[in-house]
Amino acid sequence: MSDSMDLAELTDSAASASEQTGPRTARDLEAVYDIPVTVSAVLGKATMQVSQLLKLGRGAVVELDRKLGEAIDIYVNNRLVARGEVVMVDDNRLGVTMTEIVKGDRPG
């Protein structure tokens, strides 16, 4: 590949390479199945000054930037991948159900 190849040529090249290998299957991904990832569910965020933070005590309420019933963000390895809702799994455990997959641009 030459240094003067433009984005269109690069895209065409990738597309033709993809056509040659055919569609990806679950078997193609077996090598990465055992790699651990960190999944985080973020209910919301708040910004405050350190002086405000130091005044917080037991029972204090920190207001978040989300409304009740609004979807929460689901991150995998610090990358937003989906939105979802909090659900009760057992009598005392919480879980998250995905309601929307977030398709974003990949860096790089």
Image (spheres, rainbow, N blue to C red):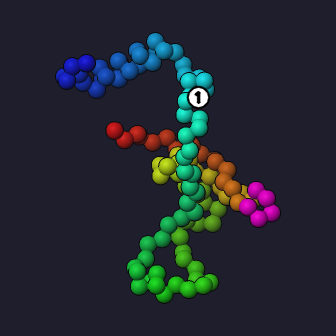
Judging depth in this view, the residue of 13 and 100 nearest the camera is 13
Residue that sits furthest to the right in the current view: 91
Type of secondary structure dominating the magenta stretch: loop
**Location of residue 76 with respect to 20 vertically, above or below:** below
Judging depth in this view, the residue of 36 and 89 nearest the camera is 36
* Mark 1: secondary structure: helix
Q: Amino acid at mark 1?
A: Glu
Quadrant, the N terminus: top left
**Location of residue 49 with respect to 45 vertically, above or below:** below
**Residue at the location (45% across, 18% down)?**
18
Quadrant, the C terminus: top left
Residue that sits furthest to the left in the current view: 4
Q: Is residue 97 left or right of residue 83?
A: right
Q: Which residue is mark 1?
A: 30
**Residue at the location (64% across, 62% down)?**
69
Residue 104 image offset from top left, x and y in percent: 45, 42
Q: Which residues are magenta?
A: 89-93
Residue 3 image offset from top left, x and y in percent: 19, 23
